[in-house]
Each structure stands twice: as structure tokens, then as C-alpha cells.
Amino acid sequence: MDELISSRAPSAPQPGGAPANRETAQGHVPGTSPLPEGPVPIGSLVFADELPDGVVVADEVGRIVVFNRVAARLTGLDPAEVYHGLPIRTRHPERSLYLADGTEVLVSVGYVRAPHTPRTPAPVSPQEGGHGGAGSPSQGGSGGMGPPGPAPLALRRLVLSLRGAQQRERLERSRAELVSTVAHELRSPLTSVKGFTATLLNKWGRFTDDQKRVMLETVNADADRVTRLITELLDVSRIESGRMEVHRQLVDLPDRARKIIAGRVAAGDAEDRFRLEVRNGLPETWLDADKIDQILGNLVENAVRHGAGIVTIVVEPAHLDENGLTDQPDAAAVSVRDQGEGISPDVAPRVFRQFWRGKPRGGSRRGQHGGGTGLGLYIVKGLVEAHGGTIGVRRAPGGGAEFRFIVPAGTAAA
């Protein structure tokens, strides 16, 4: 019968002081059979104590009726003492609850507990339990296994928190779209890299030096594309988790803009396509130089790819609070303008979302940066906000789109 001991918790105390049938981890009270009476379903012949995991079963009134040995070991509780419920429960993690109409609701549960009101124990005669039998107050229900543990806390309130599952569903769809986009964007450059390298290895002597150079340049460009995609994914992860770090140093914004323009010209863009305008009165700015380069590079890339005409970068002093009383600028603003067809006002609120790829009238896909993941402007917004700044898009004075971000001047210790 040992295999059944502790698989069932004791019944609740009977009215009128009648002793309840009890089974403990050390044995069971004489006269109480651990086996159920009457016909036994085949499924019930699997004893709870034979299972490798903890098993707890409650009846319709919430009373624990099965509490096996593994559950006792995991919780450190005597099965004889759990019929009032598990006093160690403090909360249930969030779980899905499906209503009758199929609606999913996310539910989490918290238990508000307080110590039991102390009572004076009734005197116990030696005949009634003075020898430390099971259930003796002197033994704390532990069967003489050691001093009694701390008194269980009484449940005072049960707090349920409910929220809709729509936000989680949107997040899951966003992650699925991200995985699909990454797989699509990686397939093309990796296929190219694999094809060209295999061809060069197998037929090296059949190609001229110029042909080899073209293939190697293609491999190099595709490797850069993969590197850029991985960098974007890491940036998205840091932005969503709030782990984007800003390493501030003294940054000359006009100088960083000149560097970006020089890089575009060196890559083959016409020098007369870019214009830099610097207003007087710029404050001293303490920013993350690498992230400022990334912001400017993404915005200029977006203007070149999806705009038209001259790309103008304007750097000017600004105020974080436009209604501020001070005349001293405490921020710097940078605008990147093009002369294309622009972005309509109804689309503007969506341009900084992940995977946004809106089409202006000209048919070009604005917002699709680099390899086409649609993450470029989303990352720009995250980087600007990591500096404590803001960014927006509007119609440029001469037509086209103007992306304008404002970053606080900051300090070396910020």
C-alpha cells in the first residue's frame, strides 16, 4: 500500500468534531483504506505517486484531493496539511482564457495573503495524542520530522487581471513578418555569393582578370548587404527591448553631414546633387557620433533612392520646448529635404513603422531603405528617441519630403 501514500490529501474536518479520514506522508490512520470503494475506472489504477511529475487535483469546492509525493517534495509541504489549499501560492503567470464565443483573454492571478489569527490550542491528553502521533499539535503535522515550519498565510483576496490578446497577436504577426522579410532578403545575396564563389573556384582559369573582378565586386557588395541587414536586425532588437545605449561625445553636426555627403560622392553620386546649409547659433552638442552617422546616412539614402532633384541638409539651432521663454537654443535640428513628389499627410503618421513601404504617385517605394526590409526609418526614429529627441516628416518648402529631427544639446555626463 506504500505506493498510494501521499497520493491523496485528507478530507476536510467533519462537523461535530468527528475525526476525518487522514493519510500522511508517513502512513495513514488505521481504519481508513487508501483504496476507493466500489467500481474503480481503469484509468484510476495509475497511482499518482508513480508519476514522475507533481500532481495536484482539487474537487468542485477547491479542496485538494490528490497531492502526490513529487508535489510534496517540490513544495516542501506535508500532504496532510494541504486540504485548505496551497499556502505557498502567490501568483499565477499570465495565461490564455478562452470565452464561450472563442474570444481570447489573457489572465493573471495574484494572491493577497496575511498571517492567520493566532489561536490558543486546546489541551491534549496523552491518550488523545500526547505521544506525538500524526496530527499532534506538538509535531505540527510533520510526524516528528523536525520543528514546525512557519505558519501558512491565510488568503485574504484573490486579484485577477484581464487584458485583451490583440496586442500580443499584433506582436506575433510583426515577428512573423520580420522572419519572413529576413529570409527573403537573405536568400538573394547569399545565393549570389554562393554562385559566384563556386564558379570562380571551379573555373578560375577560364575567366579574364576583368571578369573575376566583376564577380568579386558583386560578392563583396552582397556581403555588405547581408552585414547591413544583420545590423538592422540587431538595432531593431535593441530598440524594442530598450537596450539601445548612447555613448555621448562632442559631435560637430555639420562636419558629420559633410562626411555623409563625401561618402555618397565617393560611391558614385553626383556632387552637385547635395547641398549643405548651416545656420548660425548652433549649441554645443554631445551625441553618439556613430548613431548620428547612421541617422544621417539612412535619411540621405532614403532621399536619394526615393526622392528626386537636389538633396538638401539643413543644420540649425532649435528649442526642445517651442513655447520656452529662453532665447538660448538647447537643441539642434537637422532637416533632410528632397525635390520629389513628397509624402501625403494621411500617410505621414505611418512612415516610421516597421516594414512601411508606401508608394507615392511616381511609383517609387519610399521608406524602403537599403536591402528593402522597410526597417530603415523605424531604426532612425528609435536612434533619435534614444538621444531624447524627436523626428517627423512633412512637405519640404520647395516640394518633396522633409525629414526633420531634433536632438538635445546634452552634456558629457548625460
Image (spheres, rainbow, N blue to C red):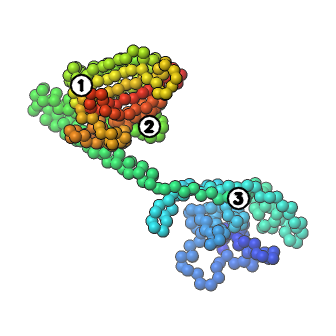
- The amino acid pointed to by label 1 is Ile
Q: Is residue 365 above or below residue 8?
A: above
* Residue identifier under label 1: 310
Q: Is residue 382 above or below residue 99?
A: above
Q: For residue 78, which quarter of the picture?
A: bottom right
Q: For residue 199, which quarter of the picture?
A: top left
Camera-side mark, 2 or 1: 1
Residue at x 49% of width, y 18% of height:
328
Q: CA distance from mark 3 to mark 1?
A: 70 Å
- Which element carries disc 3, helix, strand or loop? strand
Residue 52 percent location from the top left of the image: 56, 63
- Which element carries disc 1, helix, strand or loop? loop
Q: Is residue 152 in sight in this rendering?
A: yes
Residue at x 24% of width, y 35% of height:
341
Residue 226 percent location from the top left of the image: 29, 36
* Labels 3 and 1: the sequence-earlier one: 3
* Residue identifier under label 2: 238
Contact, mark 3 vs mark 2 (Cβ under 8 Å): no
* Labels 2 and 1: the sequence-earlier one: 2
Contact, mark 3 vs mark 1 (Cβ under 8 Å): no
Mark 1, other Cα within 10 Å: few <14 / some 14–19 / many ≥20: some
Q: Is residue 14 left or right of residue 364?
A: right
* Residue identifier under label 3: 156
Q: CA distance from mark 3 to mark 2?
A: 41 Å
Residue at x 27% of width, y 38% of height:
366
